[in-house]
Each structure stands twice: as C-alpha cells, then as structure tokens.
Amino acid sequence: MRSARPMAIVLAGAMLAALVGCGGGGSAPGPAPPGGNSPATVTVGPMVVRPASTAGFVTQTLETNGDCMFVALHGARIDYLASRALLDRIAFVSDAGGPYDIWTCDMWGGNLSQITSSTAQWDSWPTWSPDGGHIAFERQPTGGTVSEIMVVNAEGGGLTNLTNNAADDEHPTWSPDGERIAFATNRTGDYEIYVMHADGSTPTNLSNRTGPDTAPDWCPNRERGLIAFDGSNEIFIMSETGADRTQLTNNGLDEDYPAWHPGGDLIAAMVGLGTGREIVEITVWGTERGALAAGPGDDMYPSYSTSGRYLAWASFRSGAGEVWVLDTLDTRLKYRIPGLPGATALPDLGAPTMQTDRVLLGPAKSDRGHDPVWASAYAGIVAYDTDGYRNFVRIGVYASDLPGLTVTPLEHTGNLLTAVEVSADEIVNLREDSGAGFESTNWYFGDETPGAALLVFNTDTGRLTSVLVTRDSAYPSAAPSPAATLLEADGLRTRVAGSFAAVYDDQGALVAESVGTVEFEGARLVRAF
C-alpha cells in the first residue's frame, strides 16, 4: 500500500540530494528582445519586432480576403521578431530558501516570484484558482505530522488556513467555478476525498471507499462534473457528488496523481515502472494512449495548461527536480524551464497572461529552447489571424538591396490565395517557419539569384503554397515587373498568368521552368504550363 505522503518521500530524497539551481543543458535563454523596452520595439498585431533602427523601417499591410492578415517588414535589419499569446503561468515548489515554498513564473521562467516564505516544514501542491486570483496549497508545520489546506493571493499575502484541525489534509483542487475545493484527508481514520466551500466551511466526504483515496483533481470542464483521484494506486473517477465511482486502471502498476485535460476526456497520470516513473495519458473510458513524458529518470506530477496545448511536469532526469513543458500536439517539442531557483517540482498551470510564445528571429536556442528561423533578417512577411501568429517567411536579401526592395500585392486576390511580388537586386533565398524545434523550409535559388519572385500564400493558414520566379538574369525570357496577373476562374480554380522563369512548390522543390501559367486548385499547386 502506498504511503499517504509520497510527495514528502520524493522531495526529501531526490530534491534534497541536489541543493543547486536547475543547471544543465537544454534550457532556453530568456526571450526578451535585445534592448529590453527600447523605444525601437514595434508591435504589429501579436508580433513584437525590434529593428536595428526605426529610420526607414516599414510595416506594410497586405490586404487579403481570407482569414489571415499579412504584413511585410523591411527597410532595416530586424534583430528580433516574436509572437505573443495568452499563456499560463506556472505555480511550483522550490527549496531555494530552505523549506519548500510556493513560487510562480511564466512559461519561459520569467516574472519569477516567491509567493510564500515560512518556517513550515514544507508548502506543497500549489493549485491555481480558476480565476487566477488565488493559490491553494498544502502546508505542514515544522515538527508537525499533519498538513493543512491553505490559500494565498496569487501575488502573495492574504494567507488563510481553510482546514485548521488535527487531521492530515492535503492536495487541494478547485472546482471549475472556484466556489469549492476538494482535498484528501484522514479525518475518518482512512484517507478519503472531501469537498468544502472555498472558505473552508461544510467539509463533506465524497469517496467513502475502503483503502486510501488521495490526490484528487477536479475536471475543469463544468459539463463533466467529475473528480479523478488515486485510490490504492489506481486511477478512479467519480461525480462531484461522490456518485458513479468508476475505476479506470487495473493493471498492477502504481498509477498516481491524475491530472485532467481541460476537454474532460483525457487524464494524465504518473505510472511507476521498473525503470522509474513516467507520465501516461488515459481516456475516461480507461484506454491508455501512451507515454507523454518518459525518462531517463523519474517524470512526475503532470499538469495540463488551461488550453490543453501544453503539459508541465517535474523531471528528475538530471538528478535534481526541474520543471519541464511539452507541446501535446507534438510531444517531441519539450523544454526545461530555465533559471528556476533550487530544486523544483509540483508544477501547476493556470492564470493565463500575455507572454512570448514564439521567437522567429533572435539568439540561438531562444525559441522554446530551439533555434529560431534565423538570427536576424533584412525583410520578411508575417501572417496572423484572430487567434494569433500563423506563419513567418524570411526574405534573404543583402543590406545594400534594402533601398530598392519593393513588396507589391497582386490585384484580384481571391479567398483562398493571396500573392505578393518581392523585388530586389538579388533574392538569395526564402526561409519559412516550420514550427519550434523544426528546420525551416528553404527555397534556395542557386548561384544566379532572381531579382523578383511571386510569393503565393494560403490565406487560411498563412503558409506559402508556391514561389514563382518572375525576373532573373539567368532566364532572359522572364518578363519585367509587374510580371503576373492573378485570375480566379471560380471558387476552386485559380490561374496565375505571366512569364515565369521557375516555379517552386510549398516544400521549396523546383517543379517547372520557363512557363507562362501556373494553376492552383484550392490552395494547392496542381500544374505549370
């Protein structure tokens, strides 16, 4: 039978063994733009841009009829380009001050703040209130054998003891409306899941099950009305009234610390294996979907973001506790939160604020621990919609070509495609963002670089669907600018007529040379002739 105090065992063992900061490789430098809050920083929609000089710098909006807005950036070297988005903050525990205290930071480790500072033996299991205004947590006094459920303002202060009794009360979790808190307690002699009002009143036993019931997590989806918990090392769910209790796992493995996905159909949990602990994802029907985070070393205590896009957890792969974050859409994309003090664990995501989401131009490893598209650029086109950043294309030109660089939208643009002609003495290449952690897609034009190229974009995704070279010294047949006319025959078929020296597809591959018409079906290149 598992001890009712597993967190204490792990912290005292793995975390106390390393009283140093979260060192080691794999972290990202801070994403703040060079120069900090310099007046040279320019905001374009969700994008933050820092040109080397604002003199001559241009932000040119390219009107379209689709979902995306396109903005061309040129006229000066761009040293930093990043997108901002509404992202969660992270509450976690750290032993940096001796006893374990509650801290918070943003998704990059910035805006670090110590929330509690006490002489207690430990503060643990921080959990954000749904409105982000408070953090509930578990506190065990120095020399004590039982814990209490406390609540504190999100910025510190206003500390209140909600339970204040002789029983052991631990692991709080908020209801989706923020009016109640569920927790585990041994006040009946056996650990059960209780619920109380957010002011600590009217505690009520929900689980009433033989065997220890601990680590409750309240489903954020109000329509579900469910609480998951650890019952004797297996994952259970029940209604928020304690009815309809269902055992999800029964495989002989220790499965602990369930964490709901905000959609209400998935639960992340910690599973103990012979080689250590890892985090798996299971459905509310009990089907395991595989590992989200797996070694080396123990991976523990998962927490989904309020959007469900990200998962935070505590990893002990370096020997010390560290907070890691992964992208659930591609679990290969993960990074360690850099710069956190001491040994850290027990992350909880919540309280979204506007933060840096992606770094497209900037220092190495500054894009979620990965390299951005490039260190800088003299020109580029960004795409975004009402949901935020969608795409970025870096236009490779020389600094000497900036005075003569032009970006000209084609007329008669339809709902599915938009096209712009970029003209300069030489266009060396194009690089398109392929996502954090992935090499950019590259259009490389060879030694004899073109002087103009038509960039055709998908207006729904903001991504390049084709590049047409319209003027190039290597191709005498290329027509002078403006070289093309975009004619939309109907809602699906689009023809671009002109004199094109070369046609490239959406992956940068050369598909045709010396043609007069390029045809698209929807947003897909289908033929050139």
Image (cartoon, rainbow, N blue to C red):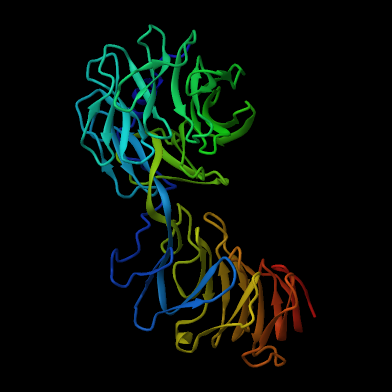
Drawn side of residue 337 relative to residue 142, left or right? right
Q: How many numbered marks appear? A: 0
How far across and how far down the image is residue 480, in percent? 64, 93
Place residue 22 in its image quadrant. top left
Place residue 14 in its image quadrant. top left
Whether residue 384 is situated above or below residue 308 in the rendered picture: below
Drawn side of residue 482 relative to residue 173, left or right? right
How far across and how far down the image is residue 386, in percent? 50, 61
Whether residue 298 is situated above or below residue 212 in the rendered picture: below
The answer to whether any part of residue 47 appears in the image is yes
Which one is nearer the viewer's eye here, 238 or 348?
Answer: 238
How far across and how far down the image is residue 300, in percent? 46, 30
How far across and how far down the image is residue 169, in percent? 33, 18
Place residue 289 in its image quadrant. top right
The answer to whether any part of residue 14 appears in the image is no
Drawn side of residue 384 relative to residue 182, left or right? right
At x 30% / y 49%, what residue is drawn? 111
Drawn side of residue 13 relative to residue 97, left or right? right
At x 44% / y 67%, what residue is drawn? 375
Whether residue 325 is situated above or below residue 8 in the rendered picture: below
Quarter of the figure that contains the C terminus: bottom right
